[in-house]
Image (cartoon, rainbow, N blue to C red):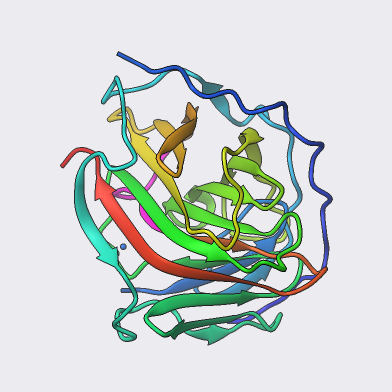
Amino acid sequence: MSSDYGAFTPPPPPPPPYQPPRQSSNAVIIVIAVVVAVAVVAGVGVLAVVIGRARAGTPSHAVSSATPSPAGPLQATSGAVVFSDDFHDSSSGWSTATLPSGTVLSYKGGKYVILAKGDLHHYAEAPYQQALRQVTASVTGTQSADAPDGAGFGVTCRRGVGAQQVRYQFLVLTGGQFFVEAGTGADSSTTIPAILKQGTSPVSPGTTAMTVVGACMSETDGKTTRLVLFVNGTSVADLTDVQDLAGNGWLAGIDVASRTANASTVTVTRFEERNPEG
């Protein structure tokens, strides 16, 4: 299934200056493209969906700075590695497709390359399809030098299907902004995700490799999920979100954002999933 929707939502105003955080004592392939509203939705096959941006902390989301167990410090490399890919094997299971927008996903020279076009996000589900109650997803890559402001990349996690789906996105964009967002319900052009957290990233996507790590760590209550975003090993966001969670656990993937101003390329050299409980 392939579709494109052509609309654009302007980005929000610049966030306040970044303040370093205080130190505290999975082989179904799904590729998704969504608008540069920094929100991504899932669908079988290839999909491009228009999504508007909601205000931070919309009523459907109970957001807190508290941290559920495992409490205490979490590192970008915490937990056992359950899946990794350096993309030297072009049959490792990632999607290779040309989207209706013209965006191309491919293996090239031992790397995973996304030539991205349009005011869209382009999402590739990882081949690892074992759902985990708690997961961290890590992507390392570079952004082409000609990428316009608002282009960038990161990771996502999702669980449940249809009306019960919950998806979180962790993104870093050129211009130096990060976003943690949540979307709920079936994938559609009317889905409006909530911005849970935004701010200034310590680094911006560019020709120097950047690593983005997003953690989705759910409690046994079936509602509460701790969300942590790391950029090059530095924790820039740590919060919790409360949703009714369906499914057996989280699946993860890569998210790439682009802008119509000009096509841009994200070259991924490594993707990794860890189980913080492992």
Give the quarter of the figure containing the N terminus: bottom right
Magenta: predominant secondary structure element?
A: loop
Query: Residue 100 versus residue 85: which sits nearer the camera?
Result: 85
Residue sitting nearer the eye, 88 or 91: 88
| Residue span colored magenta | 245-252
Residue closest to the eye, 177 or 219: 177
126 is higher (above) or lower (below) than 23: below
Q: Is residue 220 magenta?
A: no
Q: In which quarter of the image is residue 48?
A: bottom right
Residue at 48% across, 83% down: 106
x and y, in percent, of residue 154 in the image: 52, 54
From this viewpoint, is residue 42 visible?
no
Determine if the magenta segment contains residue 249: yes
Judge whether residue 13 can be spotted in this image: yes
Q: Where residue 180 sits: x, y (%)?
A: 57, 40
Is residue 215 left or right of 52 when viewed as pictured? left
Q: Is residue 204 above or below residue 67?
A: below
Residue 264 left/right relative to 233 = right
Which quarter of the image is occupied by the C terminus?
A: top left
Above or below, 261 relative to 106 = above
In the rendered image, the vertical position of residue 146 relative to residue 71, given as above or below: below
Residue 214 coordinates in the image, percent (x, y): 43, 44
- Residue under the point 29% across and 13% down: 25
Q: Which residue lies furthest to the front in this view?
A: 208
**Residue 121 location, x and y as percent?**
64, 63
Residue located 45% across and 68% down the image: 268
Q: In this view, does 12 lie to the left or right of 74?
A: right
Relative placement, left or right, of 137 versus 261 is: left
